[in-house]
Image (cartoon, rainbow, N blue to C red):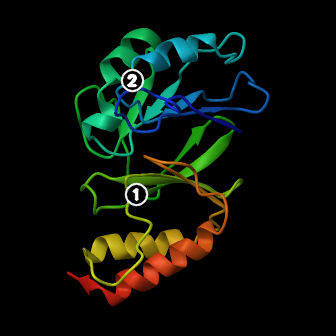
């Protein structure tokens, strides 16, 4: 699987937009965007990429949640590429509602949907076991102290994530975490459990 951050170096405030392509760009691979952000320059970047012969440039869009910095460009992406759109909550332009523990194919891999309420009620993470990749949106996965307060449902989701073999985290903002990701999750879970849980 190839992971391309289309908003790397963006000049405007936007979430990361990850474009997932199969290693061989085979006909049955699913060209997919994780979030669409709000930077229109991603459209031209997608058009310049080799996305495979006889395929849609973008087959699927998965929104990690509905905040504007992650979802604003959805109408433009739909007009340009006509993808299927997946989200945990029915927002305008979404064609498929996701469920916790559902699996879906992105690029040439299968991903598990992990409902991660906390940042928003519709937040999800996507976990790909083959690579140990976790696309986390804006889920609070770096918890460095015990001063916070967390919903029980979020702590439960963090426990589920901690049971996965996480090797790399691709967040909604900032650089990927490719070293010590699993240990960081364990520390965050420990701090969340010691914080106020409601």
Relative horizontal placement of residue 3, taking residue 45 as reference (left or right): right
Q: Residue most toward the left?
A: 198
Mark nearest the camera among 2 and 1 is 2
Q: Are marks 2 and 1 in contact (CB under 8 Å)?
A: no
Give the number of the disc on residue 39.
2
Label 1 sits on a secondary structure element that is: loop
Which corner quadrant holds the N terminus?
top right
| Front-most of residues 13 and 62 | 13
Residue appearing at x 33%, y 53% in the figure: 123
| Front-most of residues 171 and 91 | 171
Q: N-terminal of the two: label 2 or label 1?
A: 2
Up/down of 84 relative to 140, above or below: above
In the rendering, at what x and y percent does residue 180 appear? 65, 69
Up/down of 193 relative to 89, above or below: below
Up/down of 26 relative to 16, above or below: above
Give the Cα distance between marks 2 and 1.
29 Å
Label 2 Cα neighbours within 10 Å, binned few <14 / some 14-19 / many ≥20: many
In the rendering, at what x and y percent does residue 81 appear? 47, 13
Residue appearing at x 38%, y 58% in the figure: 139
Label 2 sits on a secondary structure element that is: loop
Residue appearing at x 37%, y 53% in the figure: 138
Label 1 Cα neighbours within 10 Å, binned few <14 / some 14-19 / many ≥20: some
Residue for badge 1: 100
Give the number of the disc on residue 171.
none
């Amino acid at each position: 699987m190839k992971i391309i951050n289309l908003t790397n170096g963006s000049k405007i405030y936007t979430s990361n937009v990850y474009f997932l392509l199969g290693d061989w760009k085979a006909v049955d691979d699913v060209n997919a965007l994780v979030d669409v952000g709000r930077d229109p320059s991603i459209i031209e970047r997608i058009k310049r990429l080799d996305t495979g012969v006889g395929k849609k440039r973008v087959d699927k869009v998965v929104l990690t949640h509905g905040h504007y910095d992650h979802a604003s460009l959805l109408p433009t992406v739909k007009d340009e590429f006509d993808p299927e759109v997946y989200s945990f909550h029915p927002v305008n332009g979404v064609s498929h509602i996701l469920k916790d523990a559902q699996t879906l194919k992105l690029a040439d891999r299968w991903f598990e949907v992990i409902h991660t309420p906390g940042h928003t009620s519709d937040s999800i993470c996507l976990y790909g076991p083959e690579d140990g990749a976790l696309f986390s949106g804006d889920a609070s996965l770096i918890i460095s102290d015990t001063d916070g307060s967390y919903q029980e449902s979020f702590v439960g989701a963090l426990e589920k994530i901690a049971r996965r073999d996480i090797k790399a985290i691709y967040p909604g903002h900032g650089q990927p975490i490719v070293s010590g990701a699993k240990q960081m999750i364990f520390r965050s879970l420990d701090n969340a459990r010691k914080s106020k849980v409601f």
